[in-house]
Structures are given as structure tokens and as C-alpha cells.
């Protein structure tokens, strides 16, 4: 069996969320295409699709049709039956719904990708300048933030949006490492009431007492800093085949960057932020002073 065939066989048995399986398969298809020197346009033509769809497939942003994968493998010269079968099996597994599927009525497609990535990540480093990161929000704070973004939504919809946010936090119980740098404005801005903000600060003190969760405050007196462009997150995965992914959220869409040049740049920015911000111990004292003030 060839090295490529062995690799495909291993990939078909990689555990993880459907999102990660799609990215793994997309990565393999991109490798096969580039090794053959085939353009995205020609690949798209072979499956009656556009070059943009090939790009989305290779980034794991959409589901795979088994027939499309089979046609692409043929175009890329993959003839070994074992290798073809492993990749086709991976395509089938990648189309299985994730746990968040039951929230599809309140979950936009562009954010569904992120939840899948979050569920499979081993570590997340994030910078926020407006709100506490979702994984670290208290229930009351989460509801206040959801109400700000969906002020016209009925009560039942708000309940489901909050439930989804809190369900995501279960990842903190299964070894996910979170390292957040938060602008001082975040812990001074009140999204609902002073009581909600106080509850949130107490929650931050509780969660940062747990292993694997680090929070640093970026004080106002630091002036300009490395992340002047806005909030972002960097997700890293235990599977060596997966690149780091940089996530930047907008009002109605999101940007995902997985090229090493991009992720390396953002990692350097995150490292500089961590140096500029208050160290974790001093951050805890900072939060304690807010509560006592």
C-alpha cells in the first residue's frame, strides 16, 4: 500500500466533529489537486460546479457529495481502491450532523463552521475588545449580550440562543485550553445592569481559578497595542494534519484564515498582546478591585 493510501486510511478513522472531518478531507483534496497541477476552475468543471465551490470544499466550509468526491479523485489520478474508499468514507462521516444541529433555527451557517471548529480544538487564544468571550460568559451576561444583538426576537428564540451559548461551554470540561486577552472596556461596559456585570466579573474569577483557562486584561493605560484592528481568535487542533485557523467575526458573516502565513502573523500579534497586557495574577487582582470598588 502506498504512503498516500495509508494516510487516507488513517484519516478515515480520525475522531472529531463533522467540521473537522470536512477540513481534513478538504485538505487532502487540495493536496491531490495541487500535486497534479490542476486549477480550481478545471476541478469545478469536472463536478459541474464553480471554482468558488472547489475552494469552499477544500476549506471544509460545505458538505461533500460522495459522487463529487469520487469524480475529483478520478480527475486527480487516485486509482488505488483502498485510498479511494477511505476518502469516500471520510466524506460520508463528514456529512453527519453535529450536536449543534438541533439549534439550526437560531444558528447561521457561517457560525456553524466556528462551533464545529471550537468543538474539535485543543486550544483557543482570543482577543476581545467589546464583550467577554462566549466560552467565558455567565448566564446572565450571555442573555444580555444576546438581547443586544436580537432585540426584536421573541422570548423563546432568546432562550434558545442563550442555551446554545451555554452548551458550547461544556467544551471547557473536556480539556479545551482557553487563553483570552480582554480590553479593559469589556469589564467596565455594562451590557444589561451593574448586577449582570458584577456577576460576570465574579464568573471570570471562578473560571480562571480552573486549570487551562487564562485571562489577561489590557488596561487603558497601555495606549495603542498590537491588535488595533479588532477582535480575533486562533484555534489549534490536536490533529497534525489540521492547520491553525484564525477566526474573525463580523455582524452577519465571518472570516476564516488557515494559511500558515496568516496564522503565524496573528499568533505573533497574540504573543505581543500577551506581553503588553497585565499578567494573569495581576489581572485577578484587577478584577477583585473592580468588585470591591
Image: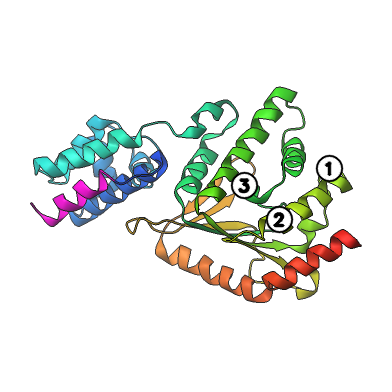
Circles 2 and 1: CB distance less than 8 Å?
no
Query: Could you tell me which residue is drawn at 25 percent across and 33 percent down?
Result: 68
Q: Classify mark 3: helix, strand or loop.
A: loop
Is tag 2's residue or tag 3's residue first in the polypeptide sequence? 2
Q: Secondary structure at mark 1?
A: loop
Considering only vertical position in the picture, is 118 above or below 166?
below
Task: Count how many numbered circles sit on residues in the image.
Answer: 3
Numbered label attached to residue 206: 2
Q: Nearer the viewer, residue 263 or 201?
A: 201
- Identify the mark at residue 192; answer none if there is no mark: 1
User: Position of 13 compared to 156: left or right?
Assistant: left
Q: Name above or below for residue 124 compared with residue 13.
A: below
Q: Residue at x 10, y 40 (%)?
A: 81
Give how far apart the Cα atoms at labels 3 and 1 are: 22 Å
Q: Nearer the viewer, mark 2 or mark 1?
A: 2
Instruction: From the top left corner, tell me how far across and down residue 250 is, in percent.
Output: 62, 47
Residue 128 lies in the magenta-colored region:
no
Position of 189 with respect to 77 (left or right) is right
**Picture quadrant of residue 284:** bottom right
Residue 147 percent coordinates (x, y): 76, 35
Q: Nearer the viewer, residue 102 or 205?
A: 205
Amino acid at each position: 500500500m502506498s504512503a498516500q493510501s495509508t494516510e487516507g486510511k488513517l484519516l478515515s478513522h480520525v475522531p472529531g466533529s463533522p467540521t473537522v472531518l470536512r477540513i481534513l478531507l478538504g485538505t487532502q483534496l487540495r493536496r491531490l489537486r495541487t500535486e497534479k497541477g490542476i486549477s480550481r476552475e478545471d476541478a469545478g468543471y469536472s463536478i459541474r460546479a464553480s471554482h468558488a465551490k472547489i475552494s469552499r470544499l477544500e476549506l471544509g466550509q460545505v458538505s461533500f457529495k460522495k459522487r463529487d468526491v469520487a469524480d475529483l479523485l478520478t480527475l486527480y489520478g487516485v486509482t488505488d481502491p483502498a485510498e479511494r474508499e477511505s476518502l469516500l468514507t471520510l466524506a460520508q462521516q463528514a456529512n453527519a450532523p453535529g450536536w449543534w444541529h438541533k439549534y439550526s433555527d437560531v444558528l447561521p451557517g457561517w457560525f456553524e463552521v466556528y462551533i464545529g471548529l471550537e468543538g474539535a480544538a485543543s486550544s483557543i487564544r482570543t482577543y476581545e475588545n467589546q464583550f467577554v468571550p462566549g466560552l467565558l460568559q455567565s448566564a446572565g451576561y450571555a442573555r444580555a449580550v444576546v438581547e443586544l444583538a436580537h432585540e426584536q426576537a421573541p422570548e423563546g428564540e432568546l432562550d434558545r440562543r442563550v442555551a446554545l451559548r451555554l452548551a458550547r461551554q461544556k467544551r471547557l470540561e473536556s480539556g479545551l485550553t482557553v487563553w483570552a486577552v480582554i480590553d479593559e472596556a469589556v469589564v467596565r461596559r455594562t451590557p444589561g445592569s451593574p448586577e449582570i456585570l458584577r456577576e460576570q466579573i465574579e464568573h471570570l474569577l471562578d473560571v480562571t481559578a480552573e486549570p487551562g483557562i487564562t485571562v489577561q486584561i489590557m488596561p487603558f493605560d497601555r495606549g495603542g497595542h498590537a491588535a488595533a484592528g479588532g477582535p480575533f481568535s486562533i484555534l489549534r487542533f490536536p490533529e497534525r494534519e489540521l492547520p491553525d485557523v484564525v477566526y474573525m467575526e463580523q455582524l452577519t458573516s465571518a472570516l476564516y484564515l488557515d494559511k500558515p502565513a496568516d496564522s503565524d502573523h496573528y499568533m505573533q500579534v497574540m504573543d505581543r498582546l500577551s506581553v503588553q497586557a497585565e499578567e494573569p495574577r495581576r489581572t485577578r487582582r484587577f478584577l477583585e478591585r473592580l468588585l470591591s470598588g
